[in-house]
Image (tube, grey):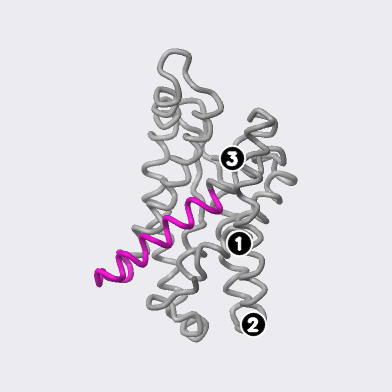
């Protein structure tokens, strides 16, 4: 998912940066409003960012020669809404690019769009869709985190396919090839991320119930 430094053509890198920037600005405004109106949720917000940082930094080799990892952004999207994760995910990706050589600054916009925008929005939509159907909380959280993870990787595959279309089959053929690169490891990793997110939410329900009540968690989550 973390597209490496200098890997995308300059115009593609600039375009993804321009697309992602409004989401990050909206996320910064949302976080600023949260800090003013609900300062007691600061620790929960920090924990959501740390969860994304740790999970997305644990790279596992793929059988296809690439690497895969969880994203961890589903938790924050479920708790605070997807706009907050646009900012938190950007901070995570900047630190990883500078400190871990994971991703890059020229590809930051593309990585932000896939991991901090596309994935969280899918996770948020899935969670609230499942809740509207009266699914158990654990099922809603699991599906949101798992499908948000898959959405991130499908988005990255699409970004790479647009940048490097197959000479014979074009963007569609390249998309299938990039998906195949990630699939063997990413499918089970997303399931593990879903289960781990359920465990974390259960712990928060036990030890941070007051903060979750402030967020109206599992009913009218932050938009």
Q: Quadrant of residue 33?
A: bottom right
Residue drawn 65% across the image and 52% down it: 21
Q: How many labels does the image show?
A: 3
Residue drawn 32% across the image and 64% down it: 129
Give the percent coordinates (x, y) of residue 17: 65, 44
Describe residue 19's horizontal placement relative to residue 70 as left or right.
right
Q: In the displayed structure, would residue 70 be above or below residue 42?
A: above
Give the percent coordinates (x, y) of residue 162: 51, 29
Highlighted range, magenta: 115-139
Circle 1 residue:
50
Secondary structure found at label 3 = loop
Which label belongs to residue 39?
A: 2
Residue drawn 52% across the image and 65% down it: 76
User: Is 69 or 103 nearer to us in this picture?
Assistant: 103
Describe residue 114's horizontal placement relative to residue 24 as left or right.
left
Give the percent coordinates (x, y) of residue 138: 33, 67
Give the percent coordinates (x, y) of residue 59: 55, 41
Circle 3 residue:
2
């Amino acid at each position: 998912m973390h597209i490496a430094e200098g890997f995308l053509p300059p115009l593609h890198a600039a375009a993804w940066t321009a697309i992602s920037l409004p989401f990050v600005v909206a996320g910064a405004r949302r976080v600023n409003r949260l800090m003013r109106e609900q300062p007691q949720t600061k620790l929960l917000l920090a924990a959501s960012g740390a969860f994304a940082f740790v999970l997305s930094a644990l790279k596992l080799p793929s059988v296809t020669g690439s690497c895969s990892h969880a994203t961890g952004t589903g938790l924050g999207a479920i708790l605070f809404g997807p706009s907050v994760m646009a900012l938190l995910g950007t901070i995570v990706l900047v630190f990883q690019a500078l400190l871990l050589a994971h991703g890059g600054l020229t590809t930051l916009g593309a990585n932000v769009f896939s991991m901090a925008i596309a994935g969280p929005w899918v996770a948020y939509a899935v969670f609230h869709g499942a809740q509207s159907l009266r699914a158990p909380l654990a099922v809603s959280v699991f599906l949101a985190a798992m499908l948000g993870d898959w959405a991130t990787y499908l988005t990255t595959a699409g970004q790479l396919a647009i940048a490097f279309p197959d000479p014979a089959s074009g963007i569609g053929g390249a998309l299938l090839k990039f998906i195949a690169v990630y699939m063997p490891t990413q499918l089970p990793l997303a399931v593990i991320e879903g289960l781990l997110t359920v465990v974390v939410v259960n712990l928060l329900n036990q030890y941070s119930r007051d903060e979750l009540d402030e967020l109206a968690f599992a009913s009218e989550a932050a938009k």
